[in-house]
Amino acid sequence: MSDRLPPLTALRAFDAAARHMSFQQAAAELNVTPAALSFQIKSLEEHFGSPLFIRHNRAVELTEAGRVLAPGARDGFETLTSAWRAARRVTDHASLTVTTGPSFTAVWLAPRLYSFARAHPEIELRFSASLELIDLVHSEVDLAIRFGYGPDTPDLHARKFLDDWVTPMMAPELAQKFHRPQDLSNAPLIHQDDIRFLDPPCDWPAWFRAANLPARDWTGQRYSQADHAIDAAMSGAGIILGRGALAARALQEGRLVAPFRTALKTIANYRVICANGAENRPQIVAFSNWLIEQTSGVADLARNHDLVDLRDVSPG
């Protein structure tokens, strides 16, 4: 038996039929007639020297040889498709696909994007607001913006562009009532669960320890997304331990105020991540540099506070 591979079109027909277990559905996927697909599979079986499908009146099933071949054929076409997409991305300098978290997209990125579009009209931006881990080497996504610690895997290139810190933030009318840190002992608190993964915890008990305040009842509203918590704070519903990076615009516009000096700083940061070697593509360089330029306002806000390292107030 020869190891010479059969024609790619015949293997493609087999792969589609094996996935659907239907010649009719496989033909529809490949945009050919069922007769043409059946001919391709028959030629493949002749090349192989043995049947790969058992034909029934209204169904098909794989033979033992077909069951052995099917996973390799599927993986082979998936690998080939990924390689083709990756090769096309290398030569594409006109588009950039970015994935980032929903909250960062809503409250930080989207309001600033007009300046990037104005400076780089030649780049078509596409966004996916998701925290799902993406394979940046083989997927169609070019760039990920992620908040956390790292380090990232060796096949990825990461560039830090923004540190984060937290401090009590509230609507201006609430600031008239809660003048001093001590006044927060009976204030309505808002909790954010989007940073619960941080270790040590970056939460209200940690901030109270940093401010040398006694513990209190920690009940209050909880939000899984930072932008929802920020909206609740701007409405006057309570006081948020706001993240400087995400609440910067609300602070600059006066919709929130951060009246106290004490702030917590974590070693977690925002990073822009791409596949190794892709960091020099023109549109990735342009977008990464633009991100860094946009962080100056957040750094200016941080200078209004005394940043306490979160590790220094850890209960452990």
Image: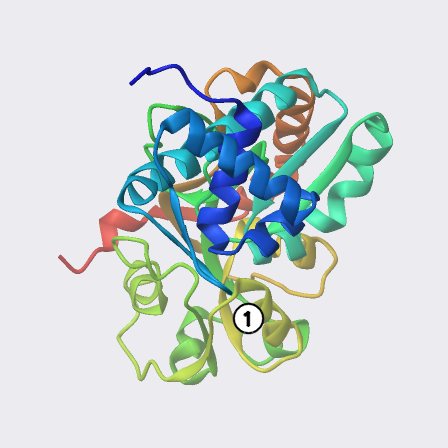
Residue 121 in the image: above or below residue 193: above
* Left or right: 210 as drawn, with respect to 223: left
Query: Residue type at mark 1?
Result: Ala
Residue 150 visible? The answer is yes
The residue lying toward the viewer, choosing from 53 and 118, is 53
Q: Which residue is drawn at 40% across and 59% down?
A: 195
Q: Where is residue 156 in the image (x, y as percent from the top left)?
A: 42, 26
Residue 247 in the image: above or below residue 121: below
Residue 37 in the image: above or below residue 211: above
The residue lying toward the viewer, choosing from 101 and 312, is 101
The residue lying toward the viewer, choosing from 8 and 313, is 8
Q: Where is residue 203 in the image (x, y as percent from the top left)?
A: 35, 64
Q: Which residue is drawn at 43% across and 39% down?
A: 74
The residue lying toward the viewer, choosing from 159 and 70, is 70
Image quadrant where residue 204 sits = bottom left
Residue 272 visible? The answer is no
Image quadrant where residue 60 sits = bottom left
Q: Which residue is drawn at 62% across and 63% down?
A: 257
Local secondary structure at mark 1: helix
> Given the current orientation, which residue lies at the most extreme left position?
316
* Left or right: 229 as drawn, with respect to 35: left
Pointer 1 local density, CA inside 10 Å: few below 14, some 14–19, many at least 20: many
Pointer 1 residue: 229
